[in-house]
Amino acid sequence: MPSDSPLPAEAWLNALSSLPDMGPARLRALLADRQPEQAWRACLQGKPLPEVEAVVGGRLLTLTAAWAKAAGQLSVSELWSQLVKQGVQVMGREHSEYPSCLRDDPDPPLVLFAQGDLQALAPAPRVAIVGTRRCTRYGSEVAYELGKTLTTAGVSVVSGLALGIDAAAHAGAMAVKGEGQPPVAVVATGLDVIYPKTNGALWRQIAERGLLVSECPLGTTPAPWRFPARNRIIAGLADAVVVVESHEKGGSLYTVDAAIERQRPVFAVPGPIRNPASSGTNRLLADGAIPLCQVSDLLEQLEGAGHFVNEPAPSPVRALLPPQHQQVLEAMGWEPVSLNTLADRCGLSPVDLSAALSALVRSGWVTAERGFYERMSNTT
Amino acid sequence: MLAAISSATLLGVRGHPVSVEVHVANGLPAFNVVGLPDTSCREARDRVRAALESSGLAWPNQRITINLAPTGVPKAGAVLDLAMAVGLLVACGEIEPELVAGLAFLGELGLDGSLRPVAGALPLVDAIEEPGVVVALGNQAEATVVGPETLYCVPDLRSLVRALRGDEPWPAVASIPEEESLEDDPDLAEVRGQRMARFALEVAAAGAHHLLLIGPPGAGKSMLARRLPGLLPDLTQAVALASSRIRSAAGEPLPSSGLLRRPPWRAPHHGASAAALVGGGSMVMRPGEVSLAHGGVLFLDELGEFAPSVLDTLRQPLEDGTVRVSRAFGSAEFPAQVLLVAAMNPCPCGGSGAPGGCRCPESTRARYARRVSGPLLDRFDLRVDVQRPNPLDLLSGDPGESSEQVAERVTSARRRAEERGVVANAELSPAMVEQAASLTEEATQLLKAALYAGTLSARGLHRVRKVALTIGDLSGHHGPLTADLIDTALSLRIDPFHPVGHAVG
């Protein structure tokens, strides 16, 4: 083992977090009053530590034995050189690049793995856009538009790169070419474990033009408990949290709890009361979240908190429509509607209605999916 | 001591002539039936003996052998009972052989000597070459349909023997009542709202396009589908005969006229086996539901609940219009020209199917969608969504058009299809589509765009053109198909299981 240059604290942190059954709480206990290197040696020796016992209770001895066994088989320097080779940045709490907003977090990640543009963690306004994985087109459109507008306004979009709202927000942020604040994706797996697989392309784009962050070492596979834990980092990194769509008991409500704990303002996008994907957000509004009716609501809040934001450019509005098409649009409303229901509502003959709908789909006013038609926003 | 009597047996939905040879000889008393009889056929010996004795006729206490020729053809059921009894009487000298010459006998005997109707009288009588046929009273209507030269209907063995001997005249043949259908088709006017779904029914009826109704429980899918036969024109003589033949062979009730004139309606439960759906059996080939619906509508409710392997057996009959069932001992061919209508929920949770409107994760939906194979889904030219109707429409809405009004348009559209040389537009061959369904420049562009976007397959392209042609026929359109007609055909062909993309842009 070449030991001429001493390893940085991050190398020991990485090794510690790679131990089996290691989570944020156990890591914090290990590092309570010792340096990472000391903690590693303690693990290697299999010494039962009272701080760890306070967290894990009766399982202390098995866990310590498992750590000692795993630590004996791991080479700290080899793990470290792998990280360096893959271009993964590792930040402990003392690291100069460690985000300042997390330094006084009630439950800060003790180590952060990052890949991409660290500029995204610079002191600029950041807004978390979160929501359900099972979103409606309305939700994904709003998330996309928000992501796009905020990025152009110089606000960094923070999200979890999950399906649905998260992905739409990131896709919106990535759609801004050139000027624009890079987005941050806080994931709950190792940076080399793409999850969910369908987001692969977006994942790689963000690794290139944004920033991927995780508190899990490379190779960590998804586990249910890691997602709520990840959500606290999203809330900690953001200056405000926007919930676009959430079910009554959605995972994004963990992010909201974490945001409230950290005194970050919570915005919720109102939705139809009949839509289950909006029941969680509407409940948040009833409980005192700030309604997000337009992006300026959010930007004003950020400016009020002392951040500098650009004026977002107004989006171009679609051309006007012939009256018969307008009639179809009005009958459609803003919720997905099937052809059959629409025919009953607007009273046009099947052939006229189909022709009008097809023209509306072609001109981008309406989307068609699984036989359901849904109105899109008036802007392009 | 030998007699040969003509009769017939069923093979699939066809009759096959059988000669019942009876030999009575001295020896130990016995009664053997040979020549591939099935169990119910072999049991004839007990019925025949009891029937003869109950009718006051002598039972020969001798060695009786009955051979059913041709011996290679399996014989099923009790249809040969009567021929065996008559054969015995001839062999014993009770009846002179000349008296039964030129006659065939079909019927099952009761222990009291009464003659019971048999399933499949229509194809059985059709198969008989003799000029005269004797059947049970209950088979009179069916037998009349195929019209043998002379038809005798008798109530029991005793009166048959007396009539044969000339002691009594043959029982008078009652006239057949002119009742039309089995049950009246319900009227489309009872459906409130559902404008587009009603239109899809009309198009399906006019062009014989298979129809898939997708929607949550309680939306009225089955109610709509049940009204489809009422929109179809009467069966042609050939189809009516074929259809009645199948029903008769399967022992299903026929109208009192003996001939099915209205399109049949079959709605098998989703637990149906492959043999129940397309036909089959181990010794006796029975037509399946798809053949029983020949000329009419086959309705598969809860399509997603049918076993996928069972559904896929439907693909070939839908394409060819016939089912060929082959088993180790032989094969049978059944006609199966049906209008397939199916209904299913958009997903297992029974939600509306609207994006965001259901509780099922994408993976569950995908699993549910896989239950209906792509090739089968492709055969549905019309796939429409049916949502629960507006409550106001249910209570106060005006009744829609009646079946009669819609059927009129359907008939005139079918007349235009006949001018093209087919019964309905769905039967047009690709070459005929090119000729009959030419496209305007705009319509061509529209289809090209759909093809490039991958929302339409090459097979789908033809089907869309045929549907557009039918829609044009219904609305009295002439000339090349316009973009509006293609648009309508495309919007009646939704892809219900297309996964919703998560990232926009």
Image (tube, helix red, strand yellow):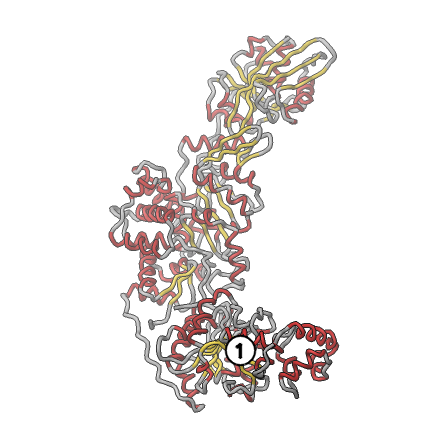
Total labels: the figure holds 1
In this rendering, the answer to whether A362 lies above or below A80 is: above
Residue B70, x across and y down, in percent: 56, 18
Q: In this view, does A171 lie to the left or right of A31?
A: left
In the image, what residue occupies the spot 41% across and 55% down?
A: B494
- Could you tell me if residue A130 is visible in this image? no
Please identify the quadrant where the N terminus of chain A is shown.
bottom right
Within 10 angstroms of label 1, few (less than 14), some, or many (20 or more) residues?
many
Q: Name the residue under label 1.
A: A113
In this rendering, the answer to whether A335 lies above or below B431 is: below
Between A4 and A378, which is closer to the camera in this rendering?
A: A4
Residue B265, x across and y down, in percent: 48, 41
- Could you tell me if residue A211 is visible in this image? yes
**Residue type beneath disc 1:** Phe
Residue B346, x across and y down, in percent: 49, 57
Between A254 and B7, which is closer to the camera in this rendering?
A: A254
Between A360 and A25, which is closer to the camera in this rendering?
A: A25
- SS label for mark 1: strand
Residue A138, x across and y down, in percent: 43, 70
In the image, what residue occupies the spot 55% across and 27% down?
A: B138
Quarter-wise, where is residue A70 in the image?
A: bottom right
Please identify the quadrant where the C terminus of chain A is shown.
bottom left
Instruction: Indicate the chain on which mark 1 is placed.
Output: A
Between A351 and B392, which is closer to the camera in this rendering?
A: A351
Q: In this view, does A57 lie to the left or right of A125?
A: right
